[in-house]
């Protein structure tokens, strides 16, 4: 039996940072970057912009806005049944692959009570008919569905169609400017926005390989936590002969692409500010490669609302928030003088991206 290498937490950390383009900013265009990351979580419109800024040597707000307007990048429900941005060409296979976890939403009382007795397939066909050639706000779409199904809650019907069918959001819903969920979401048929037919079958192998390229080495449970899917042991085992296998320090089996390089545990890495819900932090079941269990528990109460975090020496060291042209940085624990200076410098650079024309920009270092 071949000897299986054990990877330290710091090796996993440096590998993740390199594959997430956080060890150093890279010279890639935004579309290539979104494709490499598979999908960028985007409940808050500004989050993917900050995520790309943190990773790219050159990035401006309009670089992503243009991709959204052209349908090369789309905003929609996908991984973990949450809103993500992905390349249109990837969304065509990604959404059908994660559709089981999206579809599971219909079992909740929010949907089940309202659609009881309805032919959901017929509702989906009706929704597609009403959306053909159009982009409609959820409110308008729900009103049209309520006319077809009297006595039913229109917005709940619209939400159901967004679960059963691949619908993408209007480009304006992903425009720069919002730190919270947009209130006027409009939807369209994905095929019309991306100019491609949706795949007719799931593609788990592509999902797993693409995940490992950006997040590996990782366990089966890690892939499941990132995607929201379950029962991935069998497809991963089917790929085992084509993958490299490691062990974590706790003994978990970690899979990786055969030629993917590992990071140097001693590599110095810069301070990085990450937006709410960044998948570099959320992309594993075992997140100790980037955030300690103690800090993860500390932030879990507010995590559902999104907690922007910053990294020092590659690991989460606190949170940040923005109000106007002021960024407030709150460390988890006291920072060394050199680290505090680096955090303030990177915070100032972040503010240049967030509020380039405001002369009153400032970064405040709060007590943890």
Image: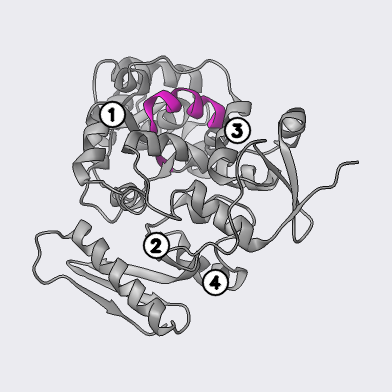
- Helix, strand or loop at label 2? It is strand
The crowding category of the residue bearing disc 2, from other C-alpha atoms within 10 Å (few below 14, some 14 to 19, many at least 20), is many
CA gap, disc 3 to disc 2? 26 Å
Instruction: Name the residue tied to disc 3.
Output: 209
CB atoms of marks 3 and 1 within 8 Å: no
Is residue 289 a member of the stretch shown in magenta?
no
Residue 141's label in the rendered image is: 1
Q: Colour mode?
A: one colour
State left or right for residue 14 relative to residue 4. left
| Residue topped by disc 4 | 295
Q: Residue 77: x and y, percent?
A: 43, 37
Q: Give the crowd class for mark 3: few <14, some 14-19, many >=20 residues within 10 Å.
A: some
Residue at 46% across, 37% down: 36
Q: Earlier in the sequence, mark 3 or mark 1?
A: 1
Q: Residue at x 65, y 62 (%)?
A: 9
Q: Mark 4: few, some, or many residues within 10 Å (few <14, many ≥20)? A: some
- The quarter in which the C terminus is drawn is bottom left
């Amino acid at each position: 039996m071949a000897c299986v290498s054990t990877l330290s937490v710091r090796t996993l950390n440096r590998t993740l940072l390199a594959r997430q383009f956080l060890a150093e900013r890279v010279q890639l265009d935004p579309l290539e970057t979104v494709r490499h990351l598979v999908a960028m979580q985007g409940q808050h419109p500004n989050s993917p912009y900050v995520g790309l800024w943190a990773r790219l040597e050159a990035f401006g707000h309009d670089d992503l806005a243009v991709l959204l307007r052209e349908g090369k990048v789309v905003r929609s429900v996908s991984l973990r049944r949450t809103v993500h941005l992905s390349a249109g060409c990837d969304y065509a296979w990604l959404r059908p692959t994660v559709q089981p976890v999206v579809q599971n939403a219909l079992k909740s009382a929010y949907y089940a009570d309202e659609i009881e007795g309805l032919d959901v397939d017929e509702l989906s066909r009706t929704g597609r008919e009403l959306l053909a050639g159009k982009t409609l706000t959820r409110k308008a779409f729900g009103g049209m569905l309520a006319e077809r199904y009297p006595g039913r809650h229109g917005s709940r019907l619209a939400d159901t169609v967004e679960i059963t069918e691949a619908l993408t959001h209007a480009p304006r819903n992903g425009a720069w400017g919002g730190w919270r969920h947009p209130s006027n979401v409009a939807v369209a048929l994905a095929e019309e926005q991306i100019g491609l037919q949706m795949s007719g079958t799931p593609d788990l192998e592509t999902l797993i390989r693409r995940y490992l390229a950006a997040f590996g080495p990782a366990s089966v449970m890690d892939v499941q936590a990132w995607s929201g899917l379950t029962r991935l042991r069998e497809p991963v085992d089917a790929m085992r002969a084509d993958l490299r296998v490691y062990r974590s320090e706790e003994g978990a089996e970690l899979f990786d692409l055969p030629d993917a390089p590992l990071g140097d545990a001693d590599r110095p890495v810069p301070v990085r500010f990450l937006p709410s819900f960044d998948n570099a932090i959320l992309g594993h079941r075992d997140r100790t490669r980037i955030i300690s269990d103690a800090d993860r528990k500390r932030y879990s109460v507010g995590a559902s609302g999104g907690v922007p975090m910053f990294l020092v020496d590659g690991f989460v060291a606190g949170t940040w928030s923005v109000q106007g042209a002021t960024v407030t940085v709150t460390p988890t624990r006291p920072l060394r003088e050199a680290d505090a200076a680096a955090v303030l410098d990177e915070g100032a650079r972040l503010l240049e991206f967030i509020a380039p024309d405001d002369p009153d920009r400032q970064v405040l270092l709060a007590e943890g």
